[in-house]
Image (tube, rainbow, N blue to C red):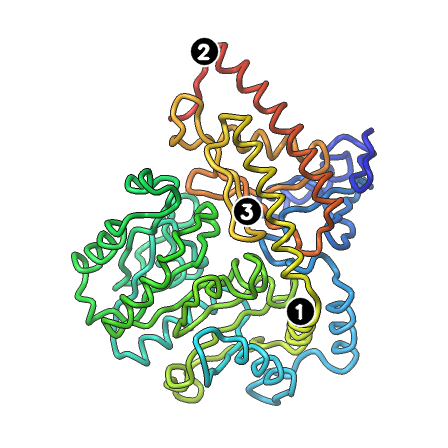
Amino acid sequence: MSSRQFIRLVTEVPGPKSRAELARATQFLPRNLTPAHPVVVERAQGTELTDIDGNTFLDLTGGIGVLNLGHRHPAVERAVSEQIRRFWHTDFSVVPYKGYWDLAERLAAHFPGGGPARVMFFNSGAEAVENAVKIARLATGRPAVAAFDRGFHGRTYMALSLTSRAQPYKTGMGPWAPEVYRLPYPYPYRCPWATRRPHHCDQQCYARIEEALRMQVDPAEVAAIIVEPVQGEGGFVIPPPDFLPWLEGFCRRHGILLIVDEVQTGFGRTGRLFAVEHGGVRPDLMCLAKSIADGLPLSAVVGRAEVMDVPVPGALGGTFIGNPVAAAAALAVLEVLEDEPILAQAQRQAEWILARLKGFAEHWPWIGEARGLGPMMAMEMVQLDDERTPNPEFAQAVVEEARRRGVLLLKAGMKNHVIRFLAPLTTTNAQWQEALAVIEEALRASSDTLSRTLASGYHGEG
């Protein structure tokens, strides 16, 4: 089997042990639990993941953006081990512990909305979103909430009501929470006005957003607008640089609270601690999760004190919120991001990686666009005969070919036609070089296969 400096493949992929274990799993798990990669992990470190067959992969999925410091970062591992030796649960509302407010203090100091700030912890990104909406409604006395096309905010009912994708998330599960309204999100690659100024939507885009809101609800009835600084599940859509500042101004004019969902973009994914820092945006509330604790379940709502202090004692809570082990992990994450030059290094690294991806796009017409904001990067796959028509077949082919060669990738986008990169920020240049060489091989093999398919007369979707 193949061997490189980091990738080590000793069986076919997936290997016989992984296939056997996954076949066993189907006897006990519902069919909706279908892993993206049919390889069963045995151990992992940094960007390397080894399965039970002994194959070692370069993992560019990062647990869907949860592992910005990589698998088993030493500082996080030490913090978790030390905390477990002391205690691992009391329920903060019963017996409090210092780690909870130590972490709150550190996060409040980083809140881009300005101080004073308050912080409350939860378990998941969806919980953070749910509670941010509760806080916004209580603070404003208004019922309505607006969200954006292609946005993803979680799978609990309010979060899923805000999420803008029917299949596979919402079909057959309604009715949905009332007073949720949808707005168009700027998408420069697909914007009809961006052709005159590439990557800059015209003011007509923002006029459409304002018009869309007014046509659905009186802005005076809107408690909050929730937005992803870069859309994650929607396809790593990067809005124009002036979009979020414009949106903040719009919210201020109408007394609407701005909730920024930094669940996927936070903790260095875009090269800054939080993505809104790129534009100097000052949110009222911010939702955090995923890489906050480098793999342990933890989320947070951070917000302006006068907003966060509105709910009465007991109005918000939960048994496991701010778990002491997860809080210890999150403190370690912040210490690493504050004290080490990881973000600056990741930003520099992303520049040459994105240049390489853009080179792929120039060579293979299947790639409509390669884009990125810092190390949050993606390639959007399109049909050969129409560069704006999504091509999920090609995206899936590349993912499968890359896996066979030892690199794990993830898709995104409304048609699953975008390949996104969520590699740990600690991934070395040498690891990236090896991964990109594999991705280039996967692109070549997928292109050859689909070209032969098209020549035979099959043209796929669209």
Q: Which mark is residue 457?
A: 2
Amino acid under label 2? Gly
Return the disc, 2 or 1, that comes first in the chain's sequence: 1
Q: Which mark is residue 377?
A: 3
Amino acid under label 1? Val
In this rendering, the label closer to the viewer, 2 or 3? 3
Helix, strand or loop for disc 1: helix
Residue at mark 2 to residue at mark 3: CA–CA distance: 33 Å
Amino acid under label 3? Met
Along the viewing direction, whichever of 102 and 238 lies nearer the viewer: 238
Along the viewing direction, whichever of 108 and 462 lies nearer the viewer: 108
Q: Residue at x 38, y 55 (%)?
A: 163
* Neighbours of disc 2 within 10 Å: few (<14), some (14-19), many (20+): few
156, above or below 301, in the image? above
Residue under circle 1? 333
Where residue 349 sits in the image (x, y, percent)?
65, 50
